[in-house]
Amino acid sequence: MDSLDDLIKRYGAAIYCIYASSENAAMRHITRFVTHDPVTILKKLHKPPLMIVPQMEAYRAASESPAQVMTRQQAGYLEIFEHEKDPWKIQAEMIARVSDGPYLVPPDFPTALARALEVHNTVIVDSASLLSAPRAIKTPDEVRWITRAQRAAEAAMDTAINRIRTSDIRSGVLWYDDKPLTSDLVRYEMNKTMLAHGCTADDTIVSCGEETAIPHCPGSGELKAHEPIVIDVFPRDTKTGYHADMTRTISRGEPSGKVIELYNTVKDALILSEKSVRAGKTGAECYHEVRDFFSELGFKSDTEGFVHSLGHGVGLEIHEAPSLSTMGGTLQSGNVITLEPGLYYRGIGGVRIENLGVVEQSGFSKITRYPMEMIL
């Protein structure tokens, strides 16, 4: 899908309708406007988007957004309120007054509003979420915003690794500043670093030992020496809303030989995938090459081993198109993707290494600038 106009025509609709706050990636992408309260966005064929906002937000919306701005009063709110008190029916009548259907809406469109809007014209649901497709190809500005978030991720990773590197080892446990070093303390220091770089992050992973065998275990408790420590951070730039994503697996002191074997294998798989990616190739092809690489070395994928996709798109959502999985479609120039092979085994631990980059005709242009060093 090349554009929102193409999507509207594909469904035989007259207008795409969104009702959401800027936490919604589609709303943020179309309007570039930040608001915690939901607003209405109407996109007609061959017309710029129209955003209906409260009067108090009109000046800021007109200053910050490329969308046309209309207040709720201009859309007839006060007149409608004289005969209708149901908020969803009021919202639907405002939409109908300024636009004719059929209306195409995203799958997360409020059900109550969809039913109220059906009174005025046909409502078609974009059940395949095709609206996300145009976001998959990033503009130079978007690549720059993602890169800025990635630098924050790297600074936070530096904070974590330096804290672990300079810790003492006491009876197998890491100590820092005369107290045990825990997952929560490392996360706290990482969060401070990201805030200083204009980013925030939720659900940062700092897992250790047996926890690392569970790919998305957030980690808790004391960090231990000679054990794998998986650190996965995916900050969001507070100004632009764009994410970055990176993972490193480290160990304070030499871990078991099996963990080292896992690490070297995953590192080789990452290098293989970086050489494999290019525009025109499918995400499924890239995924299968890495899965086959693991399998040929005896690391077969079942309930353990390589149990997730090779990667995913990154942008206003931390996981967005394209996918590098069994269902992954054709990669295109301008896609920003992660590559994150991993191997996970109960009783041993897990290893994941992740880099971020841009898909180009010539290959994978890496955004991540951070070493892949395991033993500290």
Image (tube, grey):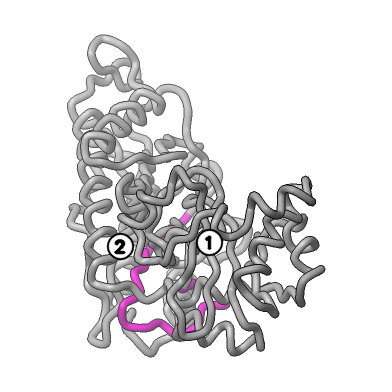
- Residue 356 circle label: 2
User: In the figure, 75 relative to 157: above or below?
Assistant: below
What's under tag 1, amino acid-wise?
His
Q: Nearer the viewer, mark 2 or mark 1?
A: 2
- Residue 253 is left or right of residue 37, and the answer is left
* Position of residue 365 measured from the top left corner of the image (x, y, whole percent): 22, 73
Secondary structure beneath label 2:
strand
User: In the figure, 26 relative to 374: above or below?
Assistant: below
Q: Residues within 10 Å of mark 2 (few under 14, many from 20)?
A: many
Question: Which of the 4 quarters of the picture holds residue 191?
Answer: top left
Question: Which of the 4 quarters of the picture holds residue 275?
Answer: bottom left
Let me know if residue 293 appears in the view. Answer: no
- Mark 1, residue position: 308
Tally the numbered discs.
Answer: 2
Secondary structure beneath label 1:
loop
Disc 2, disc 1: CB below 8 Å? Answer: no
* Position of residue 255 measured from the top left corner of the image (x, y, whole percent): 33, 39
Q: Nearer the viewer, residue 253 or 47?
A: 47
Q: Residue at x 66, y 78 (%)?
A: 100
Q: Is residue 323 magenta?
A: yes
Tell me where the magenta segment starts and ends, as one range: 322-343
Q: Nearer the viewer, residue 117 or 59?
A: 59
Q: CA distance from mark 2 to mark 1?
A: 17 Å
Q: Residue at x 73, y 58 (%)?
A: 113
User: In the figure, 42 relative to 90: above or below?
Assistant: below
* Position of residue 262 measured from the top left corner of the image (x, y, whole percent): 39, 55
Where does the C terminus fall, quadrant-wise?
A: top left
Q: Residue at x 65, y 61 (%)?
A: 94
Q: Nearer the viewer, residue 33 or 252?
A: 33
Let me know if residue 27 appears in the view. Answer: yes
- Residue 145 is left or right of residue 350, and the answer is left
Q: Is residue 334 magenta?
A: yes
